[in-house]
Image (spheres, rainbow, N blue to C red):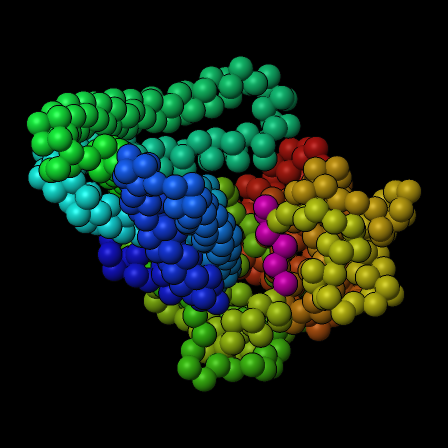
Amino acid sequence: MIKSAGKLLRYVGEYKKATIITLIFIMGEVGLEVLIPRITSNLVDVIQEDADISQIIMFGVAMVLAAVSSLLCGCVAGVACSRASAGFAKNLRLTMFKRVQDFSFGNIDKFSTSSLVTRMTTDVNNVQNAYMMTIRTAVRAPFMLVLTIIAAFSVGGQLAMTFVIVIPVLVFGFIIIGKLALPAFRAVFKKYDKLNESVEENVRGIRVVKGFAREEFEKKKFNFASGDIKKDFTWAERVVGMNMPLMQLCIYFNSVFILYVGSKMIIESAGETINVGQVSALLTYGMMILMSLMMLSMIYIMLTMSVESVKRIAEVLDEEPGISNPENPVFEIADGSIDLEDVVFKYSDEAKRDALYDIDLHIDPGMTVGILGGTGSGKTSLIQLIPRLYDVNSGCVKVGGVDVREYDITALRDAVSVVLQKNVLFSGTIRENLMWGNKDATDEEIKEAARLAQAEDFILSFPDGYDSKIEQGGTNVSGGQKQRLCIARALLKKPKILILDDSTSAVDTRTDALIRKGFREYIPETTKIIIAQRVASVQDADLIVILDNGRIVGKGTHDELLKTNSIYQEIYEQQVKGGDSDE
């Protein structure tokens, strides 16, 4: 915990000054607060001694100055503390976000999307609150406790021994309460991940939910996850709620003891041993001591809650990206040739079987290659190795005759455009979405890419054309329109390799054919890899690769595979002669 917290504190960065200002002014605030009861005690004493009005005014002015100065110190400390804690959270959240951007798909798979969201929101908020409480209250409470105890003994002498009884009782009680509440606070963060996952799935798949009339099921699922969190928090809050009764018990005991014993001492000694002003100061100091202990207990609870958050954030920051640049990367990609040599790949060390094995494949620059195979055959796994979204377990993948692990990652991915199965559009205009492919693209280049992707007609049918708004995730365009926009975005990169992962499944066969015709005519030197479910989408490819259970079980042209490959023959028979609905 201490090691993880130390790593996180590095991200205080430029807000160290605000943190130091907070600490200085808190000490000033506490010192002045402790001084006020002493001034009050002296004021009571001089009143008893029939002091003149000038002395009373002098003490009154001193009290006002101390109170105002304490207030000003508190205000300055509060502003500086807010700036320091909010800045720390900003730095921490930004660092985590940048770290996630460097993660490979394997790293993201390890954490899950919903967990990463929780860590960058709920967990960072918990750490921000803990930091704010630490630099403000965690300094204020013990400093006040020490000063107040010293002041109490200097004012009340033996009568201050009451605190020797009360303080250990409170400390012991607060520790027990904290230990009982800790397990619930630890458990709740993992349940937050599940709750966020439920929300994320529901919002993303809201059309499916409504299409299958599963709203009630989703409500029940969310209610169960939310209720589970409520149950843990209810238990924890009940335990923490015992702080107040324990605090009140000690306050009342302390007050009664001081009043009873102090009054008796005043009467018996005629004010020689202790006087009314000292008893008054002791009552105030007693309240301040107990409130300091109460603050310390709340700090303990808050830090207890943040321990799990600190660990979860540190896990993200300590995670080494599964894919990184070599020491001396290659920046130039010669051409779009692709070689897979003895490739073996699986998604994690815990995976029971390889997603790909014994893969040998050569693709010349400018070729159009079709990849067919059943669900789970390894089609997507294969193409994700080319832009190095994952690394092979053994063997190698070469682009332009160079192992992809020797390239600068950005340079490699700039040369390889991938339109994945689950590609998304982002909130903004159509133009802004297309320019993700090339931020410097001219209007003519944007229009040409849209024409090649057969997207220009429907774009111009919108009232604002290329400046029409796209909702988050592209929810206000159809599946086929979304696919064509994603293809246009990929074309704007002017890649050496273009990969379409079942990216024309939502368009009709005529549009599919026109897109492929545009590829042949306008980007003949670009290597094109097309994963498809339809034979018609790859029938005119220079090479068709058949995958089954992670292995290449056939490759050749359409005519060659019709003669030699039983899987291809079966697919062809089902789709063409069996009357495929798209044909």
The image quarter containing residue 3 is bottom left
Would you say 88 lies left or right of 455 here?
Answer: left
Q: Which residues are magenta?
A: 417-422
Q: Position of residue 528 (x, y in %)?
A: 65, 63
Would you say 369 lies left or right of 128 here?
Answer: right
* Viewer-proximal residue among 118 and 247: 247
Image quarter (top left, top right, bottom left or bottom right) of the C terminus: top right
* Viewer-proximal residue among 51 and 484: 51
Tell me which residue sits at (55%, 29%) in the image.
Answer: 202
* Viewer-proximal residue among 445 and 506: 445
Q: Position of residue 192 (x, y in %)?
A: 40, 34
Residue 416 counted in the magenta span: no
Residue 419 counted in the magenta span: yes
Tell me which residue sits at (59%, 35%) in the image.
Answer: 204
In this view of the protein, can residue 384 be seen by the observer?
no
Would you say 311 lies left or right of 13 here?
Answer: left
Q: Position of residue 402 (x, y in %)?
A: 49, 79
